[in-house]
């Protein structure tokens, strides 16, 4: 292992998109020997110490092995040492071999590995690349790592690097990056990183919050079964969307939830022979323990089938539910959530009534005083259907980290550009590219299926890592990725395979009923209904988890792949068929 180059830079002013940014990223090799100190290398400086610098990020090292990779990726002949903004260009120390807490002797200095480098947009400037480069750099896993300086001393190019101490219990930098990018919702992975030796304080705090959050999502919170909430008041948000404010009938406090989660309602709608189950997203921040709010779009009959009845629940909630009406509601659930403690820049993109989780997320960011850079991008038809427009504008006017862009597809003559909306047309990837300033964003999407599909594929084509894109469907999920099979195709395949399983038996344990499986049914839910049972359901597409129940015995196969897999030991009966001869579910 060897130190190939020591690189430094003072802070420079760089013209960028009509502005001037300051940065110390343009590092150049230093001749001779140079002092490494607790906070820095002599002659080097960092412009933004929240991102680089401090005891735990005193010296940034980048493996020379990755130079060839980037030359090839970016079609460049050569890069000088210091090209990636690193202080030390090193050979023989890569992310998959170096562990958090490892201590290395470099001549007189003793350096300890602390954490991977999370790039900012200035790396894109340095590399002469587009705004997606920081995301691409992250996704490559070739991010380099920081050292803390345990003993100060002189170092120079050519010095050997010797491992002084290593702890097998610590994760490698590669594993750290993997958990950060892909498994930040997985408690065991987070615990493994947290167990690393001498982890930097900022990361410890961040990972502990992530762990707490992940455990909260997994923990069943709230209440068992259904609870009665009373409609306290109704607020029209547009001509098509109305909010319902709900308070507990029993007077006991409402449990907290995560922004993006939803409530499941069991509605006794007059004229219906059985209760109707539907899910509606909580549309305000969780900082109001005295009420829950949902915002509901009145669903008309499809435009090409005016003869069909309009949406059952949404019209009931708009027209028949009055102040004081009691509604049966399950506790908040759902995994499409925003971590309120995360500070990653975020883009909340919605179409139509898909704005409800985004409003909850936006309100949470603002009300918790987060400085997280936030874009709220929303598309709707025109001012008639535009809900909560003034509220969102006010949030942006009062908080300089919040930015808004509203697109109307069919503005009316009375809709004013610049006041009611910002551009005419649909929300698509070109719009995002035009309005977003460079940053490594998390993207949250919710809207109609064509909107989601085009944005999802557009983001991936733009180089945004899949792991940075979160989404929720309000209607039937379809394959988002271009080229991926649609759920229907998988359904046919699975149904063919299972048709051979003629002797399977399904037992519904709670109802005390067992029946021979009939392969003409698409799902265990359909089969249960044919036996006269009435399990709860809402989407019947593996989205909402309303039908989730315990799998007591046997195995199932999914004929439609659920958008979110059920909890361990549970099954979504709306999209599952028996896989084994005996299947026992808790229905
Ligand atoms: C996780 C999740 C969160 C959600 N959050 C929200 C939210 O915050 N706000 C919100 O407004 N919605 C939300 N939804 C959607 C909501 O759950 C309902 O699906 C929506 O309100 C429509 O329900 P409905 O009972 O009014 O319509 P349905 O009765 O289910 O009808 C739906 C459509 O089918 C048409 N239809 C009726 N009969 C037929 C027929 N025979 N053939 C074909 N079509 C027919 C209706 O005219 C209507 O257009 C969410 C959904 C999910 C899964
Ligand atoms: S009914 Fe929604 S997941 Fe099964």
Image (tube, rainbow, N blue to C red):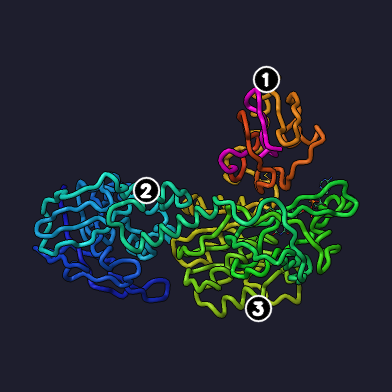
Left or right of 48, for residue 537: right
For label 1, the residue is 500
Comes first in the chain, label 1 or label 3: 3
Determine the residue positioned at 51% across, 60% down: 339
Residue 401 x/y as whole percent: 50, 73
| Residue matched to label 3 | 419
**Would residue 455 be counted in the magenta stretch?**
no
Q: Which residue is mark 2?
A: 192
Magenta region: which residues?
Answer: 566-587
Viewer-proximal residue, 418 or 115? 115
- SS for dot 3: loop
Query: Is 481 displayed left or right of 167 in the figure?
Result: right
* Quarter of the figure with residue 444: bottom right
Rendering coords of residue 565 (x, y %) = 58, 42
At mark 1, the secondary structure is loop
Query: Up-down: is 266 above or below 484?
Result: below
Q: Are marks 2 and 1 in contact (CB under 8 Å)?
A: no
How far is the residue under mark 2 from the one under mark 1?
A: 44 Å
Residue at 74% x, 66% y is 244
For mark 1, does the 10 Å Cα neighbourhood hold few (<14), some (14 to 19), or many (20 or more) residues? Answer: few
Quadrant where the C terminus sits is: top right
Q: Position of residue 543 (x, y in %)?
A: 65, 47
Q: In this view of the protein, can residue 393 be seen by the observer?
A: yes
Looking at the image, which residue is at 79% across and 58% down?
A: 314
Q: Is residue 426 visible?
A: no
């Amino acid at each position: 292992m060897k130190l190939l180059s020591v690189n430094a830079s003072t802070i420079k002013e760089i013209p960028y998109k009509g502005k001037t940014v300051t940065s110390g990223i343009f590092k150049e090799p230093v001749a001779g020997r140079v002092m490494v100190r607790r906070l820095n290398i002599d002659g080097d400086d960092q412009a933004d110490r929240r991102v680089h610098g401090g005891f735990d990020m005193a010296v940034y090292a980048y493996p020379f092995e990755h130079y060839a990779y980037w030359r090839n990726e970016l079609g460049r002949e050569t890069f000088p040492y210091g090209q990636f903004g690193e202080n030390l260009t090193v050979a023989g120390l890569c992310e998959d071999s170096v562990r958090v807490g490892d201590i290395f002797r470099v001549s007189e200095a003793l350096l300890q590995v602390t954490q991977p480098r999370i790039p900012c947009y200035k790396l894109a400037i340095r590399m002469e690349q587009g705004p997606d480069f920081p995301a691409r750099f992250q996704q490559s896993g070739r991010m380099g790592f920081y050292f803390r300086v345990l003993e100060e001393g002189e170092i120079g190019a050519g010095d050997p690097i010797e491992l002084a101490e290593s702890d097998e219990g610590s994760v490698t930098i590669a594993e750290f990056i993997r958990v950060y990018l892909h498994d930040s919702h997985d408690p065991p992975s987070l615990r493994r990183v947290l167990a690393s030796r001498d982890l930097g304080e900022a990361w410890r705090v961040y990972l502990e919050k992530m762990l707490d959050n992940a455990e909260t999502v997994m923990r069943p919170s709230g209440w068992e079964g259904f609870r009665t909430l009373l409609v306290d008041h109704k607020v029209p948000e547009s001509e098509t969307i109305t909010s319902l404010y709900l308070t507990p009938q029993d007077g006991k406090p409402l449990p907290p939830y995560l922004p993006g989660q939803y409530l499941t309602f069991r509605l006794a709608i007059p004229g219906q022979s059985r209760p109707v189950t539907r899910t509606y997203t909580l549309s305000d921040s969780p900082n109001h323990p005295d009420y829950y709010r949902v915002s509901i779009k009145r669903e008309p009959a499809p435009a090409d089938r005016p003869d069909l009845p309009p949406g059952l629940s949404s019209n009931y909630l708009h027209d028949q539910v009055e102040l004081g009406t009691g509604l049966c509601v399950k506790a908040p659930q759902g995994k499409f959530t925003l971590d309120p403690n995360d500070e990653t820049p975020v883009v909340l993109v919605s179409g139509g009534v898909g704005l409800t989780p985004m409003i909850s997320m936006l309100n949470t960011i603002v009300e918790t005083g987060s400085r997280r850079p936030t874009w709220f991008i929303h598309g709707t038809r025109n001012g008639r259907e535009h809900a909560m427009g003034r509220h969102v504008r006010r949030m942006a006017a009062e908080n300089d980290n919040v930015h808004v862009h509203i697109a109307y597809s069919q503005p009316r003559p009375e809709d004013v550009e610049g006041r009611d909306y910002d551009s005419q047309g649909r929300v698509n990837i070109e719009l995002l590219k035009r309005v977003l300033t460079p940053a490594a964003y998390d993207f949250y999407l919710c809207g109609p299926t064509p909107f989601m599909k085009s944005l999802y594929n557009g983001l991936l084509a733009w180089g945004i890592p899949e792991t940075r894109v979160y989404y929720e469907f309000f209607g039937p999920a379809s394959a988002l990725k271009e080229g991926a099979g649609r759920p229907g195709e998988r359904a046919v395949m699975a149904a063919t395979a299972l048709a051979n399983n003629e002797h399977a038996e399904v037992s519904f344990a709670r109802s005390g009923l067992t029946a021979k499986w009939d392969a003409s049914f698409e799902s265990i839910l359909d089969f249960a209904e044919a036996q006269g049972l009435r399990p709860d359901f809402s989407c019947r597409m593996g989205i909402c988890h309303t039908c989730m129940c315990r799998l007591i015995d046997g195995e199932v196969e999914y004929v439609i792949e659920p958008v979110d897999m059920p909890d361990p030991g549970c099954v979504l009966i709306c999209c599952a068929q028996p896989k084994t001869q005996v299947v026992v579910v808790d229905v």
